[in-house]
Image (cartoon, coloured by chain):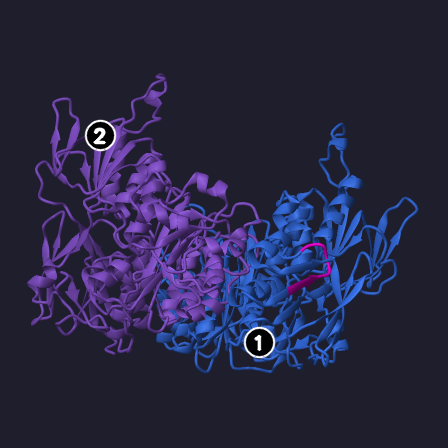
Chain colours: A blue, B purple
Amino acid sequence: MNKNMKVIIVGGVAGGASCAARLRRLNETAEIILVERGPYVSYANCGLPYYVGGVIEQESSLFVADERTFREQFAIDVRSHWEATQIFPDQKTIELRQVLTGETVTESYDKLVLSPGAAPIRPNLPGIDLPGIFSVRTVPDVRAIRRWLEASNTLSGLESYSGFQTVVKKRAVVVGGGFIGLEMAENLIHLGLDVTLIQRGDQILEPLDLEMARYVQRFLGEKGLHLVLNDGAAGFQKSEQGQLMVFTQSGQEYPADIVVLGIGVQPEVELAKSAGLEIGQRGGIRVDEQMHTSQPDIFAVGDAVEVKDFITREWSLVALAGPANRQGRIAADVICGRNSRYRGTQGTAIIGLFGAAAGWTGVSEKTLQRLGDKDYEKIYIYPNSHAGYYPGAKMLAIKLIFRKSDGRVIGAQALGQDGVDKRIDAFAMAIQAGFTIYDLEESELTYAPQFGGAKSPVNFAGMVAADVLRDDVSIAHWHNLPESAFLLDVRHPQELAVEQAVGVVNIPLPELRSRLDELPKDREICVVYRSGQRAYYATRILLQNGFQVRNVSGGMMAHSVFLRDETVAGTLY
Amino acid sequence: MNKNMKVIIVGGVAGGASCAARLRRLNETAEIILVERGPYVSYANCGLPYYVGGVIEQESSLFVADERTFREQFAIDVRSHWEATQIFPDQKTIELRQVLTGETVTESYDKLVLSPGAAPIRPNLPGIDLPGIFSVRTVPDVRAIRRWLEASNTLSGLESYSGFQTVVKKRAVVVGGGFIGLEMAENLIHLGLDVTLIQRGDQILEPLDLEMARYVQRFLGEKGLHLVLNDGAAGFQKSEQGQLMVFTQSGQEYPADIVVLGIGVQPEVELAKSAGLEIGQRGGIRVDEQMHTSQPDIFAVGDAVEVKDFITREWSLVALAGPANRQGRIAADVICGRNSRYRGTQGTAIIGLFGAAAGWTGVSEKTLQRLGDKDYEKIYIYPNSHAGYYPGAKMLAIKLIFRKSDGRVIGAQALGQDGVDKRIDAFAMAIQAGFTIYDLEESELTYAPQFGGAKSPVNFAGMVAADVLRDDVSIAHWHNLPESAFLLDVRHPQELAVEQAVGVVNIPLPELRSRLDELPKDREICVVYRSGQRAYYATRILLQNGFQVRNVSGGMMAHSVFLRDETVAGTLY
């Protein structure tokens, strides 16, 4: 390690800031310059929507470590309001421009780290630059949104409204149903706005499988969100009264007092491209496991790089703070001569919405389908978040995806109002460990009535999956039931009155053993209960009595999200 | 598998009930008899204290699955109010006695499963059988406690008190500071009683290391518990006024309107002993990995058996519902000809107290010391439960224990008011996986501002530990600081005014680089910050400038629990 090396880091948020701090800890004498185009380094970009909503009250809370901290604690030369305009890899120099004054300087470097992040996509649509249309990336962005909301009296409950009994809600249109779009929608609803969210595809939260996303969609609908699927923004106009109008591809018009774009992000790679760095098929900077780009002495980290998916080994783009931080550390390690390696990204993520959460880790079923990978099975379970006898237990919806060949856990998705994070974390550890479903059966997790069950949902997922792979039970799924199947619902008749699938025959579980003669031996029987667990008991009874039988995974809880008929509603939330 | 075998299970709660249900699922035609001495099978014994406190309002909530469910769903012959009085292994018969009528029958069995549990210890002390002294094991136990509290107007806030302004609080003495003792203490405080807890040893929650238990003790003190350590109950008396009095070994007297014994449990092994089954050194029934006892065709599961500790491979007694359930399943599997094996018990556990929690998994430091095992290091960290910029983050205290030789994670203890369960679960998965601290650094866990940090506490624990094993930093601990150490506190002077260790020299971190000449080169410097993280930054600066330096793990947060001087209080809660 060259003790006196000069390292320039471009981009001062998650990946860049982590890299800078780690570098200093490893090398006290290096010259470290942290270049940030915006006014702030190391701010909490994941907190921005909550500052808009007022959940985070003080703007100052958003600053994780300020420039002064970097200077004083880490002796890092922070240059905010400077942007990198060009790299000369052969000379090992970089041109920097002060964005306020236009001044430029050229700095030499021994090592260069690029952490430019990913920029919100702003499609080139008519009217996209009208006032009142916002993206959400930086502190100034959300400051502008807050000002707009306040200035235009967009917030319900403002004092200026206090004399009136009938306040017409101001309207927001959010374009895009990913993290930022949904978090902004929630926060705008908290502020009292009437929010419509327009999503181009057939579901929100693209990393989730469709049927799981539908639970979230239904829940958001109950919270007042107007969700428009399969449509996209086509353009924007401002009326003579100053009212914004959003036009969609399907020809609809939505009036709006504010529009928030959350369409997605794309890696900022112009600088990297101009320096001749290799760009991958997904549009991100190509790096190796040690975060080297195609140019020696230039590293890249964070949202702008392509990473290997931990399961599929595909190149992918992941815009998450955790991986960015780890990559920043690894680049610093490697610069200081260490042999650290990035292991790939599992895609573990979570979003909190109205007190509930949706989380996932590993691979989704849709990704497996896209890859033509058929070596998997899935199960759905709906356990309580903690012991049912202790007050406050909430139902979780969990989808577990595992290898049919060897039982390895490869993906999990979970939804609910309590304990989603905990279960996804456990599944994430399991995937990292290469665990099988049989290992999940044996996991020894915390249990007290407030926190879980004697069989945790993680154990339970393992047991249900293992029952399938051990051939103790065959399962069927609503979306591919055999045409000829005999559908047997073993719930109590009262429960069927609330919701039932079309064409089922009902024999309550306690009567099953005495009514076997009512069942066909020449057709496959598919058994349904509320969530599948007791269907499994029924399935075991029938199997051992010589019937061909399968358990419909997820039972009635899964029914309503697989079959589009929303009149048969499940009750997850 | 003998399709028509006859299996008798003795004990109808966690292990026995799980075994019975699993047996039926695997074998539809076996004859299964479930014998339970008490009136109820499959009740929620972990919920009992919360029923006393009224958190669980209905007694019926305590019944997980009733006798009828076992009969109807599982076709199991449930015999409550029957106890097993003798086993004749050679004849493969068992004698059963109806506890209400005294009727006896002898049943033959093909396989016998013992799940007798563990009984609360009731030491043979003077007055132990006085009315008003209770143990907590069964539904009738807690029903009796509730009746006693109601009948003796022990509950504050009863309507009969409503006319009076000054209500003298009724008093409870709880003997024993384990799960039951502490949960009962919390619930009695909730009911308005003045509670004194007497604990024989120098700490509550014996599985925790002493310094971690002290945080809990301080917190419970803030919640109003009077904790008496290093003392034990010596006897009980009733005064002429009907007042109970608890006498202790140290000669103290504590008046009480109710006394709850939570001294611990001991395996119920009389039946097993009389049948000649092997009993281990710890006093539990000895079983192999497949839950066979020393007699062919007799299995044992649950609190009454000794299990192998997952880390130390020692035989141990673990009275927890999760392991009991898994053992019940395994016994059923093996009876049905499957090759299931119990992998040992990690000792993962958690207790919720006044909205906070204490959890642990794996081995404690005190166990390692008892075994003379010196191949370990430990670190203390105090991270936020979620991103500090989002409201509601609470500080966690985490102790991580790992192998010095190879970095393997072998134990974790965590305390706090939010997210303890989640982190202990992640550490439990890590221990199950044989993960090292380097694996923890790379774990990819859920992050959103409400749920965690870009570096989760699990990652952070791994990083801090890895810094130690990579020799990036040496650590010291308060309880074994070198005598000659130069104690350097790098906090801001204002912070020192709140709390400081004796004999420290203060140089604030931002000034450190410019004041190196004030530090000795010939003595080891031990650096302190609030929780250790920034002491690590200082340590790195000093190390690279040629000083001998160590970071005091846990900093001031650990100070107050290692040094007995309670006037220097930390602020975990």
Residue that badge 1 annotates: A309
Secondary structure beneath label 1: loop
Image location (x, y in percent) of residue A520: 45, 74
- In contact (CB < 8 Å): disc 2 and disc 1: no
Is residue A289 shown left or right of residue B460?
right
**Label 1 Cα crowd, 10 Å radius (few <14 / some 14-19 / many 20+):** some
- Callouts 2 and 1 on one subunit: no
Whether residue A35 is in magenta: the answer is yes
Label 1: chain? A
Task: Say which of A243 and A77 sits in front.
Answer: A77
Which chain letter goes with mark 2?
A: B
Residue B257: which disc?
Answer: 2
Question: Residue A305 in the image: x percent, y percent?
Answer: 65, 73
The residues colored magenta run A33-40
Q: Secondary structure at mark 2?
A: loop
Q: Amino acid at mark 2?
A: Asp
